[in-house]
Image: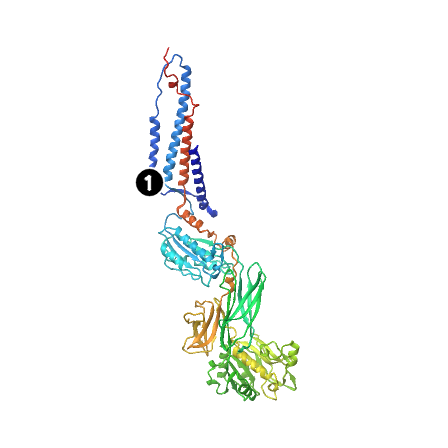
Amino acid sequence: MHLFTVLEIAAFRVILHANLCLKFAYAERRIDENVAMNVLNPLALWGLLALAVPVIVHFFNLQRPKQLLFSNVAFVREIQRTVVRRLKLRQLLLLALRLLAVAALVLAFSNPVLTGAGATGPGSRSVAILIDNSFSMTASNERGPYFQQALSLARSIIRSYGPQDEFLIMAASDPKPNLPFSGMDEALDQVQQLAVRQHSRTLGEWLSLGGALFGRASYAGQDLYLLSDFQQSTILADSSVPAASSPGIRVFVSHVGGRHPGNVYLTGHRIESAVLEPDKPVSMRMTLVNDGGSEVRDLSIRLLADGKIAAISNVSLPAGGSQEVPMAFTPGRSGWISGYAELDDQPVSFDNRRYFSIYVPEQEQILIVEEQSSRPLRILYQNLFKTFSPAFVSSQAFSTVDLRRYRAVIWAGMSQPGGGAAERLQNFVQAGGNLLIFPGTRASVPALNSLLGTLEAGSMAEAVSIESGAPAGVADLSHPAFRGIFSPGSGRQASREFDAPSVFRYYPLSPDSRTVYTDIIQLENRSPLLREVRTGGGTLYLFSTPLEPEWTDLQIKSIFTPLMFRLSQLMNQARETAPSQIIGAYTPWSVRVSGPELVQLVPEAGGAALTPEQYVRNSATTLVFDRMELQEGNYRAVRQDSVLSVISFNLPDTESRLAQADASALRARLDAMGWQQAQVLGQDADMIGKRIQLEREGTPLWIYFMLAGLLFLLLEIVVLRTGTSGGAPQPASQAGRGSQPD
């Protein structure tokens, strides 16, 4: 009985292993009815000649019984015939079991495999592996970071192929077609060198690569693997249908990850203070988003400026909610000040910072062009406004001025700007400059309208007189031009403090529907006294009346001095309050310099200077960042050791939304895109590795033949034990041995 127990345990283990092999062979509906059996070791089939041995032994054991005569042998002869038939049947059964056992063992050593249409066979293959290395892959689950899981899976896939196969390892952020393939060892080294980067591509873009990746492949058999967390906001964001790949390419999609961790991130910021001054608070708002399924309480946000903590705020956010968090800090100096807002958050940290930069002027240059002499402006800028360094020039000398030195131009008494002056002003505003115009008392309306038309600022009509004068008491007191002028209080109190000027004559203004404008001060009939027009890269402030007593008393009102001061500050700071770029969605950036010297970007975090693509147009240099590999952070735009600007580069919020598509949703998306042939794999590296081996080599059958051989030997033992039991009748020759005939 001990022998039978050992054989039963061995058979049970063999059955378990066989079932495991079948599990991989027929996984994911890959059963193929057109299967065939191949023999990997055909020389072992010569062992079937051993089948002759049991046959020979069987025939040599056939002996005719020796006849002994008795007086009464009728009963003995009947017993002999029964025993002989039983012996022959048992011998034939033993012969058959021995033949089957030998045949099964020989077939087991010949290593037969079951192959179908899905098996690749033992031939060499070209294998391309695309690994998602976007920032969302830094999220993790109980198995560790997704990116490390993808690298481990890639190594397992490589090792599952043969040493004769070739491999192409590539990061999905920067796929390059027609690259050479490499061997197994080099491919494993290439996997180790991959790193997370801040650029991702959609599934459609991946699949559209198709055969381009195999442009330099050596073998017709080609496998393409896509390893990603399949983030809904990035990888699955497109709905385009990619072009079909070559029929010889098999596509395998492996989903890494599998859960939606809660994530809180900073997605935007804006600076509310339109006028920035040293030792004056700067108001900011940071946009915070909770992408998780649970509420976040007392999340700390730190604001750092010039490398020092300037403000701290604690925020609570509901699940799936967003909120603008107000923060303020006081710059202690003038010039460019950069910093970032930072929060502590899991499971990813790449989106926990939002970079910003501001410009706090110390003494700004301002150009004042006098087509008509303006005593009120000279009093303000030469005697009162110490913040500004004014330069007064005549309209005739305007053509000789280098406008690249100025952010703001005030034109007093504009009557008939020449063609050259109008073109220079247009280029100045388009390049980001700011212009303030007081019309002249004898203005040529057609000439002014020509300039306003090029600036898309509308038009003006011939002057209109108001005999008794009309108060310009309708003011947009929420406009930055009035910020800080009135004492704190309600809008009504500010309205009472507003010293409304009277207007006796003015040029009616009409807007241009193509541009955004704001009427800062209006007459009672809603005709504008001061209009703000956003045009090109800059801003135009247009008064409808000259600074002359017979036209208006604005110059003697208490509101005039603070209004002009704020307008001058706005013009000098409008383009410098929040120079920010979103990586991957760049916009051209203009700086008011020209010449052969290039503008370079110097990262404040350290590193080599970068040179963006740039071109000069008129008095401005435009920077283009589309072809640059920039990291998030603050960069100084430098030209000849002079800091022109500080530009903040921030990540888009798409990578911060960590929701993923599960395997069923991914399968549905592939089917909808017409890629039913693509196979969706799990993320278990061992299972995928065994699957590859089974597809290449087929399902091994030797274990089944080994099991059959053991069973046949077991049955032979059973038959032998049954034949030697005590209940069996004795042969007739032995029953009559020693008797003498009568």
Q: Is residue 244 visible?
A: no
Q: How many marks?
A: 1
Quadrant housing residue 709? top left
Q: Residue at x 45, y 49 (%)?
A: 687
Q: For the C terminus, which image quadrant?
A: top left
Quadrant (top left, top right, bottom left, bottom right) of the N terminus: top left
For residue 332, above or below residue 165: below
Tell me where residue 36 appears, x and y as whole percent: 41, 42
Instruction: Say if 202 sits above or below 710 in the image.
Output: below
User: Please, is residue 77 above or below residue 539 in the view?
Assistant: above
Q: Nearer the viewer, residue 607 or 98?
A: 607
| Residue 509, position as x, y percentages in the image | 59, 80
Q: Check disc 1 and report the residue beneath it.
A: 43
* Residue 397, image x, y percentages: 48, 87
Depth check, front residue: 189 or 465 = 189
Q: Position of residue 650 (x, y in %)?
A: 49, 67
